[in-house]
Image: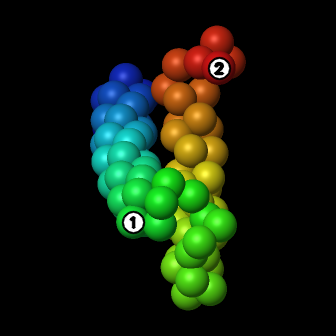
Amino acid sequence: MSDNLQGQDSTSTLIEKYREAVLAYEKITKEIAALLEANDGGTVKMSDEDYLLYRDMAHRRDVLYDMLKRLEVRLLGEDAG
């Protein structure tokens, strides 16, 4: 395979990973919003179980956000930030 085709394939793969990460980020963000809404908009009145769930989801969202930023840099270069 020529270098150009490998570069295109690599870019296509990165774009697909980025698209999947965006969808996962949007999904977890909606789930967090729903959990917060179900608990009067915050964590103060959450049960321990809901709070642990919230913290887990927030951590996963943070990991996805970091992944998105790293993929942006790989796709767009250092000016992506």
Q: Is residue 63 left or right of residue 10?
A: right
Q: Residue at x 36, y 52 (%)?
A: 30
Answer above or below: position of 39 versus 25: below
Label located before the other in sequence (2 or 1): 1
Question: As displayed, is residue 77 above or below residue 70?
Answer: above
The residue singled out by tag 2 in the image is 81
Which percent across, then down, holds residue 50? 52, 79
Q: Residue at x 59, y 72 (%)?
A: 45
What is the secondary structure assignment of the residue under circle 2?
A: loop
Relative horizontal placement of residue 12, taking residue 66 as reference (left or right): left
Q: Which residue is mark 1?
A: 38
Q: Judge by depth and name the residue closer to the eye, 58 or 76.
A: 58
The mark closer to the camera, 2 or 1, is 1
Q: Coloring scheme of the render?
A: rainbow
Residue type, numbered disc 2: Gly
- Report if residue 22 is visible in the image: yes
Q: Position of residue 65 (x, y in %)?
A: 56, 44
Q: Of the numbered discs in the image, which one, if any, rests on residue 63?
A: none
The picture quadrant where one finds residue 4 is: top left
Question: What amino acid is found at the position of numbered circle 1 in the picture?
Answer: Ala
Question: Which residue lies at the image location 61% right of the left edge and 38% below the top edge?
Answer: 70
Where does residue 74 sit, x and y in percent of width and height?
Answer: 57, 31
The image quarter containing residue 81 is top right
